[in-house]
């Protein structure tokens, strides 16, 4: 499984985003990625489905950057991660054994 994680420089984004609220940029990115096989997890973290490989991650990000001129200059950091296992730790928080 592959994931894309990114962080915006919000000051730059606020200057470059063409719509009234720069916060809508997150919605634009989410809509774009979810339509291309990614699932939003939290913040700016998206997990690819079984059809997403490393090449697909790269091409989706390249096309995203082409579609939105504000994306590349506003990104402070962006990474592709390969996830070996995806384990939900919520049950660990419910552990009643307080040593």
Image (tube, grey):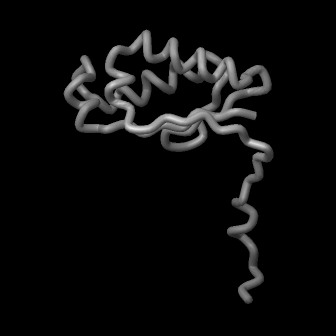
Q: Answer left or right for 11 relative to 78.
A: left
At x 70% / y 33%, what residue is drawn? 2
State the image quarter where residue 89 is shown. Answer: bottom right
**Pick the front one: 56 or 51:** 56
**Pick the front one: 31 or 12:** 12
Count of numbered badges drawn on the protein: 0
- The image shows residue 32 at horizontal and vertical percentages of 52, 18
At x 48% / y 16%, what residue is drawn? 64
At x 54% / y 37%, what residue is drawn? 5
- The image shows residue 38 at horizontal and vertical percentages of 64, 26
Q: Quadrant of the C terminus?
A: bottom right
At x 24% / y 23%, what residue is drawn? 16
Give above or below for 47 relative to 99: above
- The image shows residue 83 at horizontal and vertical percentages of 73, 42
- The image shows residue 41 at horizontal and vertical percentages of 60, 40
Give above or below for 83 relative to 68: below
Q: Answer left or right for 62 relative to 19.
A: right
Q: Quadrant of the N terminus?
A: top right
State the image quarter where residue 25 is shown. Answer: top left
**Pick the front one: 90 or 67:** 67
């Amino acid at each position: 499984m592959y994931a894309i994680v990114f962080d915006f420089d919000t000051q730059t984004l606020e200057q470059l985003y063409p719509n009234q609220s720069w916060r809508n940029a997150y919605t634009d990115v989410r809509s774009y990625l979810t339509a291309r096989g990614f699932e939003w997890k939290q913040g700016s973290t998206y997990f690819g489905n079984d059809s997403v490989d490393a090449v697909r991650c790269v091409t989706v990000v390249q096309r995203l950057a082409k579609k939105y001129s504000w994306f590349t200059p506003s990104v402070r950091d962006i990474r592709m991660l390969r996830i070996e296992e995806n384990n939900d730790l919520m049950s660990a928080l419910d552990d009643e054994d307080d040593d």
